Image (tube, grey):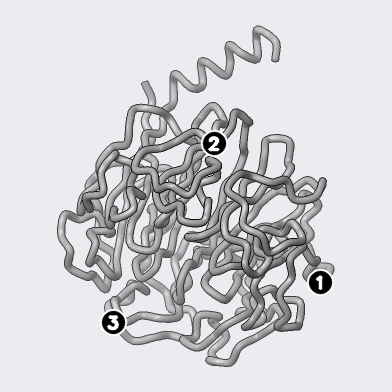
Amino acid sequence: MGFTAKKLLINRLLSSRQNLFAWGQNSFGQLGDGTTVSKSSPVQIGTLSWSQVVSGTRSLAIRSDGLLFAWGYNVVGQLGDGTVVDKSSPVQIGALSWSQVAGSPYHSLAIRSDGLLFAWGYNSSGQLGDGTTVNKSSPVQIGSLSWGQVSAEGNQTQAIRNDGRLFAWGYNGFGQLGDGTIVNKSSPVQIGALLWSQVSVSLYYTQAIRSDGRLFTWGRNNFGQLGDGTTVNKSSPVQIGALSWNKIAGISYHSLAIRSDGLLFAWGYNPAGQLGDGTIVNKSSPVQIGSLSWGQVSAGGNHSLAIRSNGLLFAWGYNGGGQLGDGTVVDKSSPVQIGALSWTQVSAGQNNSLGLLGFSI
C-alpha cells in the first residue's frame, strides 16, 4: 500500500468510527465486557472502531482495520483461538485481514480479504465444509474459491461465491441445504444454477434473495417460517410471492425481511411477539410490520432488532435476558425504540444483542 492509500485509510478511520455496544444475557461472557453479568441496556465494549459484528452465545467481530476478534462460549473451539476455554473479553484471532464473518453457536466462518473462506468449531455434520466431521479449534481454509457472502446456523452453512452461485453444506435432515435431498454434506455442493445476492441461514431452514430480488426459502417449516402459507418442509427453494426484497434475517424459527421499498415484513414462530405485529400468533405468510422505512434487520432466538432508515434502533419479542435493550426484562409484541442514537449495524443472538453505533469526529 502506497503512502497516499495509507493516508486515505488513516483519515477514514479517524473521521468515522463505529463503536461496539452489547446487551442481554451474558452467562458465557458473550457480551465481551469482561464479566458474565447480563445487561438490559446497551453497554460500550472498549473504545475500538468495528466494521461488522455477529451476536450469539459466541460473538464475532471484525475491527475497522480488518482484524478478527471473538469472545464468549468456546466449548468446541468456535472462537478459533486454538482453545476450548470461554472468553469474556474480545481475543484476536490470528493476524490476517477479513471482510465478513458468520456463525452458529457452535461453528464459525469468515471470508478473508482476498476472498478465501475459512471455518472452525463444531463439525459433527460436516458444517465446516472441509470434507471431514472433525472439530477444529483454529481456522482451516475451505477450498480455493473466492466467496462474497457466508451464513451459518444450526449445523449447516450456505455461501455465495463471487460469481453469484450458491453452495451449501452440513446438516440436511429437513432439506435445509436445498439440494432436493435430506442427506448431510461435508463439502460445499452447488444449489441449482441461479445467481443469488444474499443468503440467510436459520435453524434448519434457509432464506435467499435471487439476483433479481425474488425471495426463496427451503427447509423446515413446522411454524410457517418458510412463508409459503403452509407448514410443510421443502428440500428445494420455493419462491415467496412476486415482490422484490433487499434484506433478510433469521436465526431460530421466525423470519424478517425488508422489501425493496423499505417496508418490513415478518412470519413464522411468534409466542413472544417476535414478529412485531402486536400478537403472539404464528404466521405462515409474510405480514407487514407498521409503515416505517427500514435499513437493516436481525432476527434472534426469539427477539428481533431493526434499524430504521434514519438510524434509530427498535426491538421487540422475548426479553427475559434484557436482549431488547430497553432497560427491562418485559416482552414486547410491537417494536419499541431503543434510545435516540443513530446505529449502523445490529445483530441479534440467541438471547443477547450487539450493535455498532456510528459517529464522525
For the residue marked with disc 2, what is the amino acid? Ile
Where does label 3 land, which residue?
Answer: 279
Decide which of 177, 212 is in the foreground and name it: 177
Give the spatial CA distance, label 2 vs label 1: 34 Å
The residue drawn where x is 65% and y is 15% is 5
The image shows residue 289, relative to residue 232, as above or below, that is above
Nearer-N-terminus badge (2/1): 2
Name the quarter where the N terminus is drawn.
Answer: top right
> SS of the residue at dot 3?
loop
The image shows residue 71, relative to residue 130, as above or below, that is above
Nearer-N-terminus badge (3/2): 2
Decide which of 82, 187 is in the foreground and name it: 82
Left or right, 64 with respect to 309, comes to right
Decide which of 291, 235 is in the foreground and name it: 235
Q: Position of residue 149 (x, y in %)?
A: 66, 52
Where does label 1 land, which residue?
Answer: 192
The residue drawn where x is 51% and y is 21% is 12
